[in-house]
Image: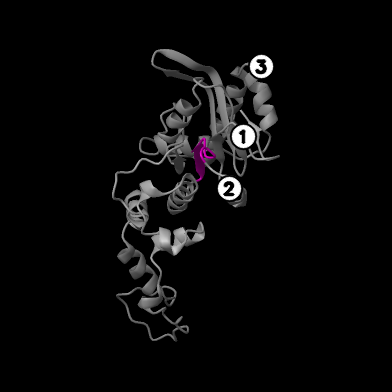
Amino acid sequence: MCAEWIRANISGYVAVDAAAVDAVAVAAVEKFKEMLSEVAKAILADSGDKNFSLDIQNIILAFAGRVLLRKADVRFERGHRYGLIGQNGTGKTTLLNRLSAKDINGFPQELKTWYIRHEVLCEDGITVKTFLKQNAPEEKQTDAAILQARDTDAPRTPGASSHTHSTAPRPPRTPRTPRSSLVPLSLQVLEEVGFPDDLKDTYVNSLSGGWKMRMSIAISILHEPELLLLDEPTNHLDRDAIEWLEKHLLSLEGVRRPRNSAQFWRNSAQFF
């Protein structure tokens, strides 16, 4: 990665010798390691070959003139679950807000992040399906676009485009799914989280805490995050809703799930 950065920054000015750049990059990294503090060296040695999606060191977090964190490290390894535990007023939600906004120096801006807050804020008179569309990624906000993409999806001859003709034999075409049988994406994710049909057109503000959480999870599925943040996700949930949420989150693969809650999943947490 260091070599790539060097090449990207000097290629427009001088001729790039790949071998020389690689050597400089290796030397720079080794020099950086030598300059680390003993604590930082221990952390680096402990990391080994771990795959971190987020590794920010020596952060300072302040809110309303009060320093909440000083010289703190935040490291999320891919595929792990993390719990944030602390007394009220210590800055747990503030940290999650800053992480979700990528408003911390060194946060990788390309990391796909989604934040499920402890309460759903919605105006009166908004149905579940409408709320999902409003909070979906821009490319997934219209069911028409989803239907069109799925209805026209068919294999093409390799190397041929829609503007060329080829005399080579075409592979057998996959039968198209009738448009009438296609299910809009917003309904697909609601079905995935177990939403019954009679609640899909219900007003959001009339839902129980458990169904609001399922709706929030459905929205997160649309965003396909690499880092999923949850703030007190079990608040106002009954036992069945908590068990469903636990089962769903434990089933996710390749997603980091830092969350803030007084209760944490059995044998599933690593703390920072």
Q: Which residues are magenta?
A: 226-236
Bin the neighbour count of mark 3 within 10 Å (Cα to Cα): few under 14, some 14-19, many 20 and up: few
Q: Name the residue carrying label 1.
A: 263
How far from the left and from the top, in percent, is residue 125? 28, 50
Q: Secondary structure at mark 3?
A: helix
38 up-or-down from 213: above or below = above
How far from the left and from the top, in percent, is residue 251? 61, 52
How far from the left and from the top, in percent, is residue 146? 36, 65
Magenta-span inclusion, residue 79 = no
Q: Quadrant of residue 161?
A: bottom left
Q: Which residue occupies the foreground of this view, 35 or 120?
A: 120
Q: Are marks 1 and 2 in contact (CB under 8 Å)?
A: no
Cα distance between the residues tagged 3 and 1: 35 Å
Q: Is residue 185 left or right of residue 237?
A: left
Q: Name the residue carrying label 2.
A: 249
Cα distance between the residues tagged 1 and 2: 15 Å
Amino acid at circle 3: Glu
60 up-or-down from 272: above or below = above
Q: Name the residue carrying label 3.
A: 38
* Mark 1 vs 2, N-terminal side: 2
Q: Secondary structure at mark 1?
A: loop
